[in-house]
Image: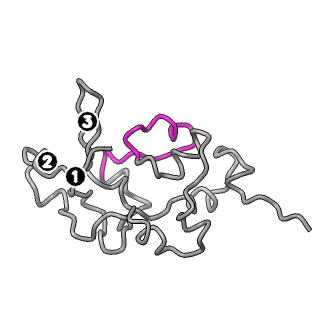
């Protein structure tokens, strides 16, 4: 008996249910970090500073439903903008699928284990600095890696 392909291999992002869409998130937390862009070069840098709503230990937003009202510059990821958000990590399932790439082998949808993102060393550190505890002028000194 032939098994049906998983939903992410047979459905375009626009046709996914809300539950399917949300399950694409691997829980890495990297989209909740402060990201710096070099306008001249186009380079993108991660910092160790996180959104004030981000719980770094659980790697989840503490007010997901109201995040865009409470954090005006929070970007709501949609099937329409997923391929355009170049600051998202290249490992992000939303970005990968939007660009015709498969999700990584370590993704929890494949492994069945939410901790697989940690073992793959994709998850953010639990030792992040909340944005409301640092002066924006110091963000450049908090760069941890280039994307």
Q: Start and end of the magenta stretch?
A: 71-88
Nearest the viewer among 15 and 66 is 15
Badge number at residue 37: 3
* Classed neighbour count for the residue bearing mark 2: other residues with Cα under 10 Å, few (<14), some (14–19), many (≥20): some
Tag 3 and tag 1, C-beta contact below 8 Å: no
Badge number at residue 47: 1
User: Residue 22 placed where, x, y %?
Assistant: 55, 60
* Residue at image coords 56%, 37%: 80
* Classed neighbour count for the residue bearing mark 1: other residues with Cα under 10 Å, few (<14), some (14–19), many (≥20): many
Query: Is 27 one of the magenta-colored residues?
Result: no
**Vertical arrangement, residue 43 with respect to residue 95, above or below:** above
Q: Give the color scheme: rainbow, by chain, secondary structure or one colour.
A: one colour
Report helix, strand or loop for mark 3: strand
Tag 1 and tag 2, C-beta contact below 8 Å: yes
User: Residue 115 placed where, x, y %?
Assistant: 46, 75
Residue that sits furthest to the top in the current view: 40
Report helix, strand or loop for mark 2: helix
Alpha carbon distance from label 1 to label 2: 7 Å
**Vertical arrangement, residue 90 with respect to residue 105, above or below:** above
User: Residue 9 placed where, x, y %?
Assistant: 70, 52
Asked if residue 143 lies left or right of residue 98, the reply is left
Kindly indicate the quadrant of the structure image that contains residue 63. bottom left
> How many labels sit on residues?
3
* Residue at image coords 51%, 45%: 95
User: Residue 66 placed where, x, y %?
Assistant: 39, 58
Kindly indicate the quadrant of the structure image that contains residue 103. bottom right
Q: Considering the whole magenta stretch, tell me its main secondary structure.
A: loop
Asked if residue 16 lies left or right of residue 147, the reply is right
Alpha carbon distance from label 3 to label 1: 11 Å
Report helix, strand or loop for mark 1: strand
Residue beneath disc 2: 139
């Amino acid at each position: 008996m032939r098994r049906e392909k998983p939903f992410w291999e047979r459905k375009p992002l626009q046709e996914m249910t809300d539950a399917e869409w949300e399950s694409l998130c691997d829980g890495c937390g990297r989209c909740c970090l402060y990201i710096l862009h070099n306008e001249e070069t186009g380079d993108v840098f991660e910092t160790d500073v996180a959104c004030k709503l981000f719980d770094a230990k659980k790697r989840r937003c503490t007010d997901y439903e109201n995040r865009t009202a409470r954090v005006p510059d929070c970007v709501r990821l949609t099937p329409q903008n997923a391929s355009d958000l170049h600051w998202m990590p290249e490992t992000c399932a939303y970005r990968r699928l939007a660009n015709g790439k498969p999700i990584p082998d370590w993704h929890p949808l494949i492994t069945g284990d939410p901790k697989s993102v940690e073992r793959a060393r994709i998850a953010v550190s639990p030792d992040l600095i909340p944005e409301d505890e640092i002066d924006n002028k110091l963000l450049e000194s908090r760069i941890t890696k280039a994307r």
